[in-house]
Image: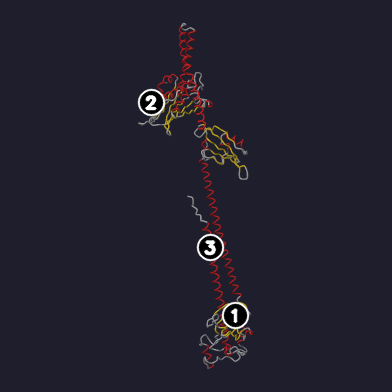
Amino acid sequence: MQQKKIYAPSWLIIGISLVLMIVVLIMGAMTHEREKQSVTALLQEKGAALIQAFEAGARTGMMGLLGDEAHLQALLEETARRSDIRFIALVDAHGYVLAGSEKQRAGVTVADFAIGNAFAPNDTAQWRIRTDAQQGRVFEVYKRFLPTGDDGGGHAHHMEHMTGMGHHAEMECASTWIRDMPRKAILDAENRPTIVIGMDIRPYEAAIADEARHNIITAAIVFLVALAGVVSLFWAQNYWRGRKLLGDTRAVASEIVRSLPVGMVVVGSTNTILYINEVACSLLSVPAPMTEGTPASELLPPSLVRLHAEATGQKSRGEQELTLTTADHQHAVVNVSTSTVFGEEGQYIGYMFILQDVTDLRNLERGIRQREKLAAIGDLAAGIAHEIRNPLSSIKGYVTYFGSLFAEGSENREAAAVMAGEVDRVNRVISELLEFARPSDLRLQPTDLHTLLDHALHIIAHDLQGAHIRVNAQLPPDLPPVDIDPDRMTQVLLNILLNAIQAMPQGGTLTVTAQAEEGRLAIRLADTGEGIAEEDQANIFNPYFTTKKNGTGLGLAIVHKIVEDHGGSIQVCSALGEGTALIILLPLRRAKDA
């Protein structure tokens, strides 16, 4: 079972491509945003950890545990030594830089550090990206500076216990910890400063850019692969559509060629059969399955082989009429048209024969010519028969009279008898001419063929017995009655049977068969006599054509006329030394009471 292929319309393929592109873009954007959030969280956590470490160091330094040489500025600068830290600054609520890793910033008010809607620090580390006047774009992590603990407990209580002071008093720390800085503003527990760590944003932006490039490359690859798949699908679809169209075209062309009522044979450049249809196989009497690839000389009849040898390589077209023997051993007149087959670039591909069976056409032409001859002879016979017959009666009367004047057995009396016989022969010819020229006046009636044939055979039974001819009658018992003129058809049978007797002077077998086929009745009368030469078979129904010494040449002409008057036809099959068979074909019309 042939698999059915599904073809998608062009708009569906374009729609799939667009949807695929949108999906790839969305996935790339989502991946980019996810990576951006991941890097942001990483930097935020890193900044928060640095702030916690700085606050821990500040608490330790305030308690004087780092030695007398340690101070807040040194801690700021040391913490900012990391390559990814741009600056660390402590600012108040107005953006005034109380202390920082960059000394030149100390005592400077930075508007971006003033508490407002865009900058609202609390006890939790927050982040933002800002363009600094000196450092450029930086990733800032900020929160309130809590050097004494997270919420006033823990280390704050420990320091209060050590100093004996509460929250309302200034936080105590080592005397050397805060030097050359606004001590009160840094340690103000009520208005705690904000610690801001500015981190290098370039790794952040580089990571985002790398991820963006990776996403773009991945999206491009995915899109190109998908696009290649869609284009491949489109090409495959066009290929299968084109292949199907080509297959349909070939099927239509093959069906057209196969259905043509003419034979077609294509011979390749290597003189082998490339193609042959069923009609050609029937006309050439060759089996169809084993023809293609067979050498032309083994398959084609000699006449076609010679024609192919003469026409090979020529661009001219030609026609020739040949007689071929068909698969049913019948002779067929075939009109052969020859044509050379060239490729698109003009190269020789092969040769093609078109075989058209014109047997029926030629038979029709012969029938027309036959009727024309018969009509001319009929007109001639009608014009002169009566003029000749009357003088013949007088001549015969005088010959008989003068013959009676001579003695019995005398030479003159024998001459008179010969003259009377010749007059009778001429009179018989004239009678046949009148019979041949007489217009058809058929009296059709339902007739049983068994009765008709028995009657005709009974009439010539004495002749059959004297010629030592055996009759083999094979008539099916269920033959239907046929509407014919019994008298005229008896004359047809008698003429044919008498010709058969004369064709078997040494005796033989006369076979009579009949059968109903395809709406007509076929009566076949065959002898085992001398046969008829092939060149004479086309003329035996012509008036006055005869091969017998004493024949008039009108017997079969009258047979042909009577059969045609009944709407039938007559065929001859004969070969020298093999006998002759005449086949009468009559239209089968059942009787009204049948």
Q: Position of residue 61 (x, y in %)?
A: 58, 88
Q: Nearer the viewer, residue 486 or 292?
A: 486
| Local crowd size for mark 2, using a 10 Å CA cut-off: few (<14), some (14–19), many (≥20) | few
Q: Is residue 233 above or below residue 122?
A: above
Quarter of the figure that contains the C terminus: top left
Of the two numbered discs 1 and 2 on the same chain, state the one appearing first in sequence. Answer: 1
Please give left or right for residue 347 compared with residue 572 in the image. right
Q: Earlier in the sequence, mark 2 or mark 3?
A: 3
Figure colour scheme: secondary structure
x, y percent for residue 134: 63, 80
Question: Identity of the amino acid at label 3?
Answer: Leu
The amino acid pointed to by label 1 is Gly
- Which one is in front, 269 or 553? 553
> What residue type is disc 2 on?
Thr
On the image, numbered disc 1 is attached to which residue? Answer: 198
Q: Secondary structure at mark 1?
A: strand
Question: Is 450 placed above or below 101 here?
Answer: above
Is the C-beta separation of discs 1 and 3 under 8 Å?
no
**Percent position of residue 249, x then y:** 53, 47
Relative depth, front residue between 470 and 302: 302
Circle 2 SS class? helix
Name the front one of labels 2 and 3.
3
Q: Earlier in the sequence, mark 1 or mark 3?
A: 3
Could you say whether the residue bearing mark 3 is in a helix, strand or loop?
Answer: helix
User: What residue is shown with label 2?
Assistant: 451
How many numbered marks have been drawn onto this rendered protein structure?
3
3D distance between C-alphas at marks 1 and 2:
133 Å
The picture places residue 35, in percent across and down from the top left corner, at 55, 72
Residue furthest right in the image: 104
Q: Look at mark 3 in the image and give the residue it sits on.
A: 20
Identify the residue shown where x is 56% and y is 58%. 231
Q: Residue furthest left?
A: 593
